[in-house]
Image (tube, grey):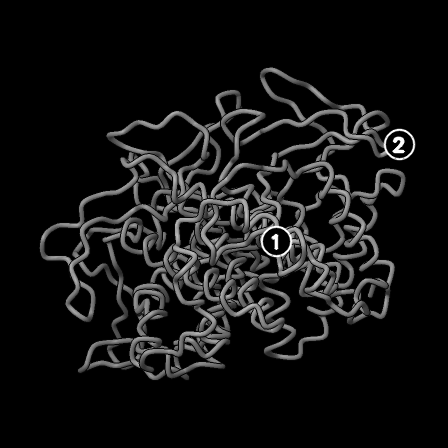
Amino acid sequence: MSNSSSRTPSTSSSPGLGGPAAKKRKASSITSVSDNQNDPEEEPCKTFRNHAHQFRIPELFEENVIAKIFRVASRSMKESLVFSQVNGVPLSYPETVPQNGANAGTYEFRDPEFWTCGFFPGSLYALLERSVKYPQSISVGSDVSSIPVRELRTQIRSLCKSWSRSLHSMAFRTDTHDIGFIVMPALRRDWELTGNEQSLRSIIQAARSLATRYVPSSGAIRSWDCLIKKEITVTDQTENSLVIIDSLCNLDLLYYASAHAGDNSLADIATSHARTLLKTHLRPENSIIVPTSGYQGQLYSTCHVANIEPATGNLKWRWTAQGYANESTWARGQAWAILGYAQTYMWTKDTTFLDTACGVAEYFLHRLDTSPPCVEVERGASAQDMFGARKSTKGRHVPLWDFDAPVDPSDPLRDSSAGVIAANGLLILSQALMALGQVSLSRRFSTAAIDIVRDTIDLCLATEKAQFFSDGTDIRVDDLGLGITFDAILKNGTANNNQNARRRYWNHGLVYGDYYLIEFGNRLLDLGLV
């Protein structure tokens, strides 16, 4: 591991976590919470019942979640264009489920080289993990034909092996920085659940493949070899090094492999990359009103793409390939930064990264809170929570696809995947802050994570649900409503709506949106919050 991993965190000198910068900002801010209000850290939990209810999102653990993933996995293995009937490996992987058009409701597949290929095998393994560690969270089948968890687990394990088989050869790829996204969701779980040494070897190999893209003079890992859009072309790697904000989430691979292989150079590369992006991708945001319970340090928005001069490490320019504009805040990019810097802190315990993650997270929450009123949708007079309280609207916590893009008041364009990615990062942040005794801020971020996922479920969960049936000899999945199918769990994802993109597509299910939704449920189980 890098030297920073041995540092002792000190919240007294960390901006925003109780140091001088925090005191100065708090004194000069007009907060949305009265300064006379009791400190949440001093308030005891009112009742265990209320505390448990705070984290209750039953839809995360419904049969529908497992059934949909199971059906796509088993059905696709019978399709010759998707799965090799000779070699038994995927020829393509699920990516999007259109909400409209001729293919509405059915997964569209991408080639194995595309960066999203690891998320569907990852979803299968996440469900396998849930069935192994938390079988009590799984209930499938009707009252008259219930399916034992062990039987379902056996079939899921078989699907996991089939869908992850080709990921091992991908570990040798040096043409992509997304190798962390490709191998970690599935192979890390395979190693940890089954002790499969091949999966650990592939993870270490993938990390070493990623390390070949590190440019020491710039202190960063090259994300893209080129950028070719309608309005810009960048192909010369001697003069340009393109780095995208998503890259922060591939650092987890380097840290994990470093710890297992005893190769400190991998962790050092990851830490160097994270430090470089502090300068190249973060844009300080000032004069923002933050609640007294919120993070009081520096807030940041993020850019999508930065071009770094390889020879000097100087920033040449910033761009966006998937957001609205170069100066706008692309919601999923901001979410990648929350998750990436939260993970980096957990590996290094360097509070620079914790402060950064908090600053990025607080800005994300600020943009949710200040989105136009049209993001709120009427629920209907009959909508109630489990305690009978009326809920009038939903959608406030489901992010717009880009926080600065024009909004159609009649149909605001969202990105549900950005919300659930951010929620995972917020939950990690909450853990980190609780360990440092920052109880109030920890609660703020955990509550925000729950609010985002609860609202995303309420607004974006596909109403076309699926369920298991068994005749005693076979397990099958049927639509809850006959012939009404939608393969993804969530709707309202936006992959890319940049006006100059070669392919613009939005309002669909996204494989990584579903993966991070399942991941969030597993995190709640790991923390004992449900």
Identify the disc placed on residue 312. 2
Residue 271 drawn at (x, y percent):
78, 54
Label 1 SS: helix
Q: Is residue 81 visible?
A: no
Q: Quadrant of the C terminus?
A: bottom left
Label 2 SS: loop
Q: Is residue 429 visible?
A: yes
Residue placed at 58% from the left, 16% from the top? 230
Q: Callout 1: few (<14), some (14-19), or many (20+) C-alpha neighbours within 10 Å?
A: some
Q: Amino acid at mark 1?
A: Ala
Q: Nearer the viewer, mark 1 or mark 2?
A: 1
Residue placed at 61% from the left, 53% from the top? 22
- 467 lies left or right of 174: left
Residue placed at 56% from the left, 62% from the top? 429
- 346 lies left or right of 524: right
* Count of marks, rendered view: 2
Residue 397 drawn at (x, y percent):
36, 49
Q: Residue furthest left?
A: 381
The numbered mark, 1 or 2, whose residue comes first in the sequence reads: 1
Residue 357 drawn at (x, y percent):
61, 53
Q: Quadrant of the N terminus?
A: bottom right
Quarter of the view holding residue 58: bottom left
* Distance between mark 1 and mark 2 Cα atoms: 34 Å
Residue placed at 50% from the left, 56% from the top? 120
The residue carrying mark 1 is 22
